[in-house]
Image: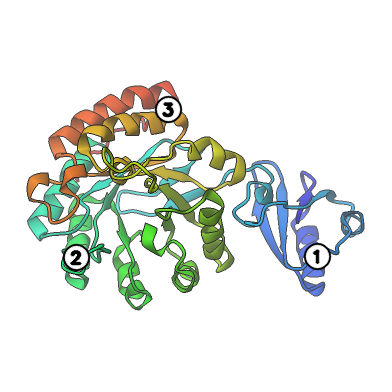
Amino acid sequence: MIVVMKVGTPELEIARVNQEFSERGLTPEKIVGKHKVVIGLVGETAALDPLQIQEISPWIEDVLRVEQPFKRASLEFRHGDYSEVIVPTPNGPVAIGKNHPLTIVAGPCSVENEAMIIETALRVKAAGAHFLRGGAYKPRTSPYAFQGHGESALELLAAAKQASGLGIITEVMDTADLEKIAEVADVIQIGARNMQNFAMLKKVGAQDKPVLLKRGMAATIEEWLMAAEYLLAAGNPNVILCERGIRTFDQKYTRNTLDLSVLPVLRNLTHLPIMIDPSHGTGKSDYVPAMAAAAIAAGADSLMIEVHPNPAKALSDGPQSLTPERFDRVMQELSIIGKAVGRWPQVKAAIA
């Protein structure tokens, strides 16, 4: 249930209304929009009469029920106001959301060595990226495949961050590693395999760093949004959704099926920012530029693209990685579409 306050409602009145809701056993959450303040009510609201709620204050404009099972993630919960995630980085804050320029995340699947990760960071920043992605801990289908360098890779990410000024996005695989990952990462990623690891969602949702939630390999949109609900319910409002392809019947020509239809669907369902990962979505570098362009045209807020100095020798996901040279060319091509839809950053990043 949401309570819409009238324009100009005094802060003291909002505080008084929140106190009354709390005394009724509800959890009020104040949401400040562009023009109005909305109070989201979490708890047993099924028996509440909206007309009685409206009598609490003459400053209450409307009382509406949230019909979706994902309450906090629902667009209704914010009364149609899309949220933004603002991430502090060494180069300054980066805003991700529907009402901001496109944000670019780029880098290798996994951190291999210091020279490689710093070179990649500098190259993708020069091409216009805002964040460096790189796995310190890697989930792999085979127990014999490269699992990442772990804690030592976090030190290498910190070095790349210092050298480039880019923000860092990296994945958590075990809640025991969460604290040390949060010391380096600016955004903590929950991968597709852990999308429904509910214990992890609660732990990650209880910390302060923004969270990137990748869609599970066979997850429905509602299951994905319910996973986001776990993060929001744990107290973290800064959640970004990432579509990275789902598993369907045809895996002969692409690694996954990149579901770009989620963009208009999610826009109608949730206020959360939306990222598209065409690298995992297709699994082949030749297809990444076209899917990235399509994602921008369809309204993506951010792109995640894998880049490696030498994809042929990459320890993981080489076939879907672009070289830095190709990434630079692709960014120039994407800028044409980005500018056409009014989402391209005006200033190109420069090497620090």
The residue labelled by disc 1 is 16
Q: Residues within 10 Å of mark 1 (few under 14, many from 20)?
A: some
For disc 2, the neighbor class at 10 Å (few under 14, some 14 to 19, many from 20) is many
Quadrant where the N terminus sits is bottom right
Secondary structure found at label 2: loop
Q: Secondary structure at mark 3?
A: helix
Q: Find the residue positioned furthest to the bottom.
A: 176
Q: How is the image coloured?
A: rainbow
* Nearer to me, 147 or 175: 147
Lower sequence index among marks 3 and 1: 1
Q: Is residue 105 above or below residue 176?
A: above
Residue lying at 12% horizontally and 45% vertically, measured from the top left: 311
Residue 148 image label = 2
Tell me which residue sits at (37%, 44%) in the image.
249
Q: Is residue 336 visible?
A: yes
Q: Which residue is mark 3?
A: 297
